[in-house]
Image (spheres, rainbow, N blue to C red):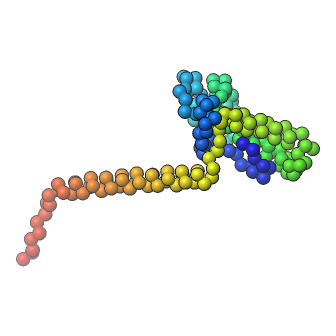
Amino acid sequence: MELSADHLSPSSCDSQLVSAAALANKTYLDTLSGKQLYARMLGDLLLGYRKQLGYDKVGDMLVQKIQSVDADNMTALMDQATTAHIMLGMQLEASGNPLPEQWNNYPDVMAAYNRRQELYQKIDATGHQDMPREMYRQWLQSMQQEEQKQQDKAEYDQLLKELNKLKHIRPTFKNTPKQ
């Protein structure tokens, strides 16, 4: 997952393709052991925690717990890569945002960069690959269309239910003119 210096946004876990290498490495679409299932559940907890509370030591401890249960857990690995990416951004900012060709002059920047690259290589070795933006946009659009279809069907079913109720109601008033 090679990123240039101008592409410093973290990778996401929700837009992935399943490659042949990922299948061969049993990274995706394989039976989970009890420990792996537990680690996946902790991974879901981690994703919710990060979304609500961001990156902190509690989340980092959760990553360590996940990896102690399942060292190959993709969620933990992706989280570590995102954390390393954030750390690189912080080191770059603290160093005055040097150009990539100047990074060798900043040991902290290079250490953060090397850590991020190491994690990206680990992720690449699993067979993980990000979904191309256009494909992700199309998938997202199809999900929104499906959601709209389900909403429309629910509203239609509710309308039919109400119409059926109305068919069985007898009028309780008489329409007689006043004299």
Left or right? Give the position of 70 relative to 5.
left
Q: Residue at x 72, y 42 (%)?
A: 1
Residue under the image location 63 percent in, 52 percent down: 133
Picture coordinates of residue 47, whole percent (x, y): 61, 38
Relative height, residue 134 to residue 49 (above, below): below
Quadrant position of residue 82: top right
Q: Quadrant of residue 126?
A: top right
Where is residue 90? Give x, y as percent: 80, 45
- Write the residue at 79% across / 36% down: 115
- Residue 58 position in % (x across, y down): 68, 33
- Residue 84 drawn at (x, y percent): 75, 39
User: Furthest-right residue in view?
Assistant: 105
Which residue is farthest left? 179
Left or right: residue 107 compared with residue 36: right
Residue 110 is left or right of residue 24, and the answer is right
- Closer-to-camera residue (5/162): 5
Q: Residue at x 6, y 77 (%)?
A: 179
Can residue 44 be seen in the rendering of this structure?
A: yes
- Find the residue positioned furthest to the bottom: 179
Viewer-proximal residue among 51 and 177:
51
